Structures are given as C-alpha cells and as structure tokens.
Image (spheres, grey):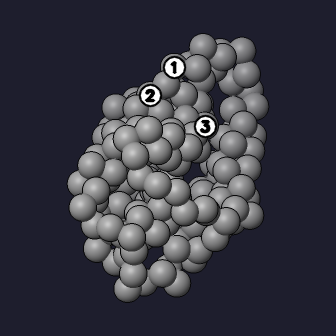
Amino acid sequence: MDLPSIVLIALALSMDAFAVSIASGMVSKKLAFKMSLSFGSFQAIMPIVGWGAGTGVKNIISSIDHWIGFFILTTIGIKMIYEAGKMERIEMSNHAILLLSIATSIDAFAVGMAIPFLGISILMPAVIIGVTTFAVCMLGFALGGKAEFLEEKAEILGGIVLIGIGIKILLSGL
C-alpha cells in the first residue's frame, strides 16, 4: 500500500473523532488537547491490535485476502455513512473521553486486521493514523461552533473514502 492510500485511510478513520471534536468544541474548548491526544492514541493503538489478530489468520485465508480487505473497508465505510449525524451529546468526563476514544477507534481495529493481507508493516500506518487523528481533532475543536454543518459531511466523506480504498484493494487482488 502506498503512502497516499495510508494517509487517505488515516483521514477517513479520523472523521468520526473529528465529528465528536466539532460537537465537543461547540460546548467547550478546554478539553481539546486531552481529547485529541486520547483519540489519536487509541486510533494508533487499535490498528496494531487488529494487525495482531489479522496476522494470526493471514496464512489461513491468504487466497481471499483482497476480498476480506474490500469487505472490511466497505463495511466500515457504509457504517460511517449510515451513522453520520447520529451522535448524541454527552458530558465529557474522563470516563466519557475513554469510551468515546474506544468507540471512535473500533473501525481502526478492523482496518488493522486488513493490513497483514496487504503485506506492509503496521508501524508506519499506525503512527500516521494516530498523528492524523490528533491533528484533525484539534482542527475539529477549533471549528466547533463555527462549522457544525461539517459534522455529518465529514463522516460521510470518510465512509466514501474507505469504500473507494476497499474497491481499489479488491481490484488490485483480482
């Protein structure tokens, strides 16, 4: 997988955290760094965990790996599009930040499961995903209140990008 594809995946995966950051930024900007760091950290860790799970089954299913990558990315993309704009407002305690960090990084876990099938190391994508998410979340907090209309559109765009990359993986494996 090339660097532009990894960056696009990172941007797509960060869109749900971006939406949460915009919504949170409308309420308060004092948690911007803490939440962005938490989101970025979980987005970096979860692909590594998913990669570990995917590595365990890679040899068993290598003949259909392109279909698996396509299915995982397309499913996550469709889910992001379907759930766009359905986020609830909640109090931002440390517990809530932890839960939001986990919830917004589940898709990164699934993407991490697909990475062993692409024959690349996990370290660079994990770092790029984490750093990108941190930066995008900081931007979301800065925009909070000024760009509420972006919240739903960001998740839809992220979903479309993941579906497109899934199709690219499928076509390259056929």
Choose between 33 and 80: the one closer to the eye. 33
Identify which residue is drawn at 73% across, 50% down: 75
Q: Residues within 10 Å of mark 2 (few under 14, many from 20)?
A: many
The one of 77 and 152 positioned closer to us in this rendering: 152
Kindly check if marks 2 and 1 are in contact, taking CB atoms under 8 A apart as contact.
yes
Q: Report the quarter where the C terminus lies.
A: top right
Q: Position of residue 112 (x, y in %)?
A: 53, 34
Q: Amino acid at mark 1?
A: Gly
User: Where in the figure is residue 56, as x and y percent of width and height?
Assistant: 60, 14
Q: Residue at x 40, y 46 (%)?
A: 93
Residue 103 in view (yes/no): yes
Closer to the N terminus: mark 3 or mark 2?
2
Note whether 138 is above or below 62 in the view shown.
below
The alpha-carbon separation of the residues under discs 1 and 3 comes to 11 Å
Question: In the image shown, does 84 or 127 lie closer to the viewer?
Answer: 84
Residue 48 badge: 2
Task: Give above or below for 147 relative to 173.
Answer: below
Mark 2 secondary-structure assignment = helix
Q: Identify the residue under disc 3.
A: 110
Q: Residue at x 55, y 35 (%)?
A: 109
* Side of 13 where 33 appears, left or right: left
Determine if residue 164 is in view: no
Residue on which the image places disc 1: 52
Badge 3 element: helix
The structure residue drawn at horizontal position 66% and vertical position 17%, both measured from the top left corner, is: 57
Disc 1 is placed on an element classified as: helix
Q: Amino acid at mark 2?
A: Ile
Q: In the image, residue 138 lies at what x, y percent?
A: 29, 63
| Label located before the other in sequence (1 or 3) | 1
Count residues near mark 3 (Cα–Cα under 10 Å), then give few for <14, some for 14-19, many for 20+: many
Q: How far apart are the alpha carbons under marks 2 and 1?
A: 6 Å
